Image (cartoon, rainbow, N blue to C red):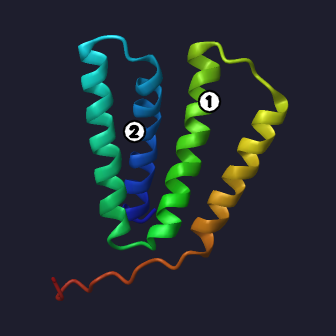
């Protein structure tokens, strides 16, 4: 996996935390964690967007974050499991994977060419 796509994955991972934090944070420490998650999430997405097409980065970021948030709500917060919801999340993820597969990888610099 390209390191830029890893940055998108990390950004989406932290997106789940800040989205949950916006709903469930009840004290200063939880809000601090939410703000830190927002910073990490957007920083990683911006770094990935410098090399990868930003439209694809954003679509993958949002799709993975949405799926992760729905999963976390079901597993950790007692949100009811609905087959239709899972179906549409899977459909969303199929689209995200498709976008990633059709996006050209950036050309890497050769070892002697450091810019």
Which residue is under mark 1? 71
| Dot 1 alpha-carbon crowd within 10 angstroms: few under 14, some 14 to 19, many 20 or more | some
Instruction: Please state the horizontal and vertical placement of residue 28, each as a whole percent of the image.
Output: 24, 15
Q: 109 or 57: nearer the eye?
A: 57
Q: Nearer the viewer, residue 103 or 21?
A: 21
| Quadrant position of the C terminus in the picture | bottom left
Q: Residue furthest right?
A: 84
Could you tell which of marks 1 and 2 lies nearer the N-terminus?
2
Image quarter of residue 50: bottom left
Q: Is residue 27 above or below residue 39?
A: above
Residue drawn at x 41%, y 65% as measured from the top left: 2
Using residue 100 as the reference point, say whether residue 35 is left or right of it.
left
Look at the picture and state if 92 lies above or below 49.
above
Whether label 1 touches label 2, CB < 8 Å: no
How many numbered marks have been drawn onto this rendered protein structure? 2
Image location (x, y in percent) of residue 1: 46, 62
Q: Look at 29% across and 43% down and name the residue there.
A: 40
Disc marking residue 90: none
Location of residue 83 by image quarter: top right
Q: Secondary structure at mark 1?
A: helix
Asked whether, in this view, residue 2 is left or right of residue 66, the answer is left
84 and 13: which is toward the camera: 84
Q: Which residue is pictured at 28% across the width and 26% down the height?
A: 33
Considering only vertical position in the picture, is 57 above or below 86? below
Measuring from the top left, give residue 18's x and y in whole percent.
40, 32
Say which residue label 2 marks.
Answer: 14
Task: Specify whether 78 is left or right of 58.
Answer: right
Q: Residue at x 15, y 83 (%)?
A: 114
Q: Residues within 10 Å of mark 2 (few under 14, many from 20)?
A: many
Q: Where residue 66 sits in the image (x, y, percent)?
A: 58, 41
Asked which secondary structure carries label 2, the reply is helix
Q: CA distance from mark 1 to mark 2?
A: 14 Å
């Amino acid at each position: 996996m390209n390191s830029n796509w890893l940055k998108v994955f990390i950004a989406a991972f932290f997106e789940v935390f800040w989205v949950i934090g916006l709903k469930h944070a009840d004290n200063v420490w939880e809000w601090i964690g939410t703000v830190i998650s927002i910073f990490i999430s957007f920083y990683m997405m911006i770094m990935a967007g410098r090399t990868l097409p930003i439209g694809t980065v954003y679509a993958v970021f949002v799709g993975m974050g949405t799926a992760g948030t729905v999963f976390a709500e079901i597993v950790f917060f007692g949100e009811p499991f609905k087959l239709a919801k899972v179906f549409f999340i899977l459909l969303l993820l199929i689209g995200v994977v498709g976008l990633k597969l059709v996006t050209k990888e950036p050309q890497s610099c050769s070892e002697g060419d450091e810019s």
